[in-house]
């Protein structure tokens, strides 16, 4: 069986305000071409189909057309939701679509129930938010807990001699992150061990945007397009997987089309404008970090005369001595959300957040994370969260009022 592993399409996303919809349409052209030329049997899409829970109409139309083309090219398509997707919206009409060769899994109740294609069992695991999935799965409220419980259900349903493919949207230990992924857990506690996937013939991962191998049978396909300048050195694409009669056979990298390459330049303004070493960046999307001791006049306008596709300008002046004059923004860059919030309290009032304050902020961030996934949290399973959210405004007003 031939399987094309892809993920993290993020349809509807822009790159520093540059619309990527036409580039995302080209990615479907390439996927359809691979399905036809390589005689792909199954396309596995491991989450983050859309970039946000309420996608724009253009993104919805592009997905509709793209999935139709993949199925028409001769492949069955197995899709699971990611942390950017609305599980309810993406999963609409899933049971009916399965009869047409499009298998969409977004509901925790389907965990452990395989999609059987020929003699291979596919287990597409939707993104499992611990605050929502731990109850239905009967697990502890953590990423390790819910994904461990999901994999226990997968193993309980496996039949001897049947090959298995699991797709999951998670941050697995050993994976290399970039700047464009949304944090999965408050405080950076979202990583899970690689050992959770032991014994599976192939594991198709989504969430991290760099294509990478964690073990011969566990891989991230990465995103087909770059979504941050931290991905400038990544080679984008997917994996073409061949399952033999005894399990995993070959895995080949498939390169994705590059709409425009990325370049990161650093130095003083006059050097960047004059040096021939940067000629190759003149047609690229460019990020520039200026190191002039003093801010030059009109740096963006001057740089764009040479680099017309300059999208981001950073200022990091070279300074002598050991004094730390970095900005507050520079100091918090890359920190988890909870650390940023606690650091802000310490910054404005001169003392660290207490344990009670840290727990309150963690609860607020968790509620915001869940709301961003679905827009509205409803139903009996979420009553505790709704009750908690109702008291957050008062608690935060009191907390910040003390600052």
Image: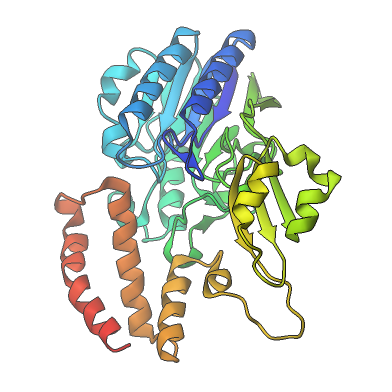
From the top left corner, tell me how far across and down residue 322 is, in percent: 73, 85
Image quadrant occupied by the N terminus = top right
- Seen at 37% across and 38% down, the residue is 111
From the top left corner, tell me how far across and down residue 265 is, in percent: 73, 52
Residue 248: image quadrant is: top right
The residue closer to the viewer here, 305 or 228, is 305
Above or below, 151 against 386 in this view is above
Answer with left or right where residue 213 lies relative to residue 355: right
> For the view shown, which residue lies furthest in the right direction?
276
From the top left corner, tell me how far across and down residue 211 is, in percent: 64, 39
Residue 62: image quadrant is: top left
From the top left corner, tell me how far across and down residue 120 is, in percent: 51, 21
Above or below, 395 against 260 in this view is below
> For the view shown, which residue lies furthest in the front direction?
297
Regarding residue 119, the answer to whether it shows in the image is: yes
- Seen at 58% across and 43% down, the residue is 209
């Amino acid at each position: 069986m031939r399987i094309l592993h892809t993920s993290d399409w993020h349809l509807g996303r822009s790159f520093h305000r540059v619309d990527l919809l036409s580039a995302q349409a080209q990615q479907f052209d390439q996927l359809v071409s691979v399905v036809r030329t390589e005689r792909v049997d199954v396309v596995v899409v491991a989450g983050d189909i859309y970039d946000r829970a309420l996608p724009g109409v253009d993104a919805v139309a592009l997905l509709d057309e793209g999935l139709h083309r993949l199925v028409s090219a001769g492949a069955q398509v197995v899709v699971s939701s990611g942390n950017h997707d609305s599980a309810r919206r993406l999963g609409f009409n899933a049971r009916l679509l399965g009869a047409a060769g499009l298998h969409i899994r977004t509901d925790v109740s389907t965990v452990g129930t395989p999609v059987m294609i020929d003699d291979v069992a596919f287990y597409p695991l939707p993104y499992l938010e611990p605050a929502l999935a731990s109850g239905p799965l009967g697990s502890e409220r953590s990423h390790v807990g819910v994904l461990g419980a999901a994999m226990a259900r997968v193993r309980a349903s496996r039949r001897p001699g049947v090959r298995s493919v699991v797709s999951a949207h998670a941050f697995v230990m050993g994976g290399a992150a970039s700047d464009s992924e949304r944090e999965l857990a408050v405080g950076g506690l979202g990583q899970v061990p690689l050992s959770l996937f032991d014994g599976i013939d192939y594991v198709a991962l989504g969430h991290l945007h760099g294509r990478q191998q964690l073990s011969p049978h566990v891989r991230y396909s990465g995103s087909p397009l770059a979504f941050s300048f931290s991905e400038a050195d990544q080679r984008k694409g997917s994996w073409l997987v061949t399952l033999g009669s005894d399990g995993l056979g070959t895995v080949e990298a498939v390169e994705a089309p590059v709409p425009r390459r990325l370049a990161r330049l650093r130095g003083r303004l006059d050097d960047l404008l004059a040096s021939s070493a940067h000629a190759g960046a003149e047609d690229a999307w460019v990020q520039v970090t200026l190191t002039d001791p003093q801010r030059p006049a009109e740096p963006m306008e001057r740089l764009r005369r040479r680099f017309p596709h300059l999208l981001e300008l950073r200022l990091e002046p070279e300074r002598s001595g050991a004094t730390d004059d970095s900005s507050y923004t520079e100091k918090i860059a890359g920190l988890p959300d909870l650390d940023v919030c606690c650091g802000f309290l310490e910054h404005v009032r001169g003392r660290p957040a207490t344990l009670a304050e840290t727990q309150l902020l963690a609860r607020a961030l968790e509620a915001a994370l869940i709301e961003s996934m679905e827009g509205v949290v409803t139903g009996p399973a979420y009553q505790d969260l709704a009750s908690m959210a109702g008291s957050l405004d008062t608690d935060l007003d009191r907390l910040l009022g003390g600052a």
